[in-house]
Image (cartoon, grey):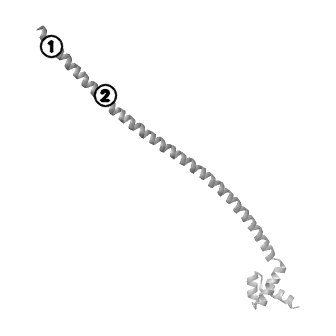
Amino acid sequence: MNNTLIFALIAGFSILELVVLGGVLFFYLRLRRSEAMLNTLQGNQEALLARIEMNARLEREIVATFAQRQAELQNLDEKLEERAQELRRLLEQAEGISRSPQFLRELILNGRRKGLSSRQIARNSGLSVDEVELILAQEIE
């Protein structure tokens, strides 16, 4: 019985060793799968970080371009305001000239030379018919 007990113990330990070996193999395979999954996650993380970096770079470029466009618009606005002031000054000067007696006289005389009636000349010059006829009468004298 002593032999059978030893044989049973050896068989029991062998089975136990096989079970432990199976467990180690199972954990090893799980570890390999976890390692592969971890490597995939790291690769995805690196790709994500690269995309985030690219997006940040694009955002910086857009902000820089926006700031540049804002500066250009401000410069154009200043130039436009300068032009508007210059045009206002020229309009005031033109209105002053167009209302000068000498200019109105020349306008009326040119209208008469072209064969326009006193009424047409008055409408073109913004004067009354009487004023036009008065200036024309002074020219005849």
Residue at the disc numbered 2: 28
Quarter holding residue 42: top left
Residue at the disc numbered 1: 7
Q: Is residue 129 left or right of residue 16?
A: right
Picture coordinates of residue 30 (x, y %)?
Answer: 31, 30
Image quarter where the N terminus lies is top left
Picture coordinates of residue 113 (x, y %)?
Answer: 79, 90
Q: How far, Cα to Cα, is label 1 from label 2?
A: 31 Å
Residue 134 against residue 1 in the figure, above or below: below
Of 15 and 111, the residue lying toward us: 15
Residue 123 against residue 4 in the figure, above or below: below
Q: Residue furthest top?
A: 2
Of 75 and 21, the residue lying toward us: 21
Type of amino acid under label 2: Tyr
Image quarter where the C terminus lies is bottom right
Crowding around mark 2 (Cα neighbors within 10 Å: few <14, some 14 to 19, many 20+) is few
The residue under the point 33% across, 33% down is 33
The residue under the point 79% across, 71% down is 93
Q: SS of the residue at dot 2?
A: helix
The residue under the point 60% across, 50% down is 64
Instruction: Name the mark nearer the viewer: 1 or 2.
Output: 1
Picture coordinates of residue 91 (x, y %)?
Answer: 76, 71
Type of amino acid under label 1: Phe
Mark closest to the chain's N terminus, 1 or 2: 1
Q: Is residue 71 left or right of residue 89?
A: left
Q: SS of the residue at dot 1?
A: helix
Q: In the rendering, which numbered label is found on residue 41? A: none
Of 10 and 63, the residue lying toward us: 10
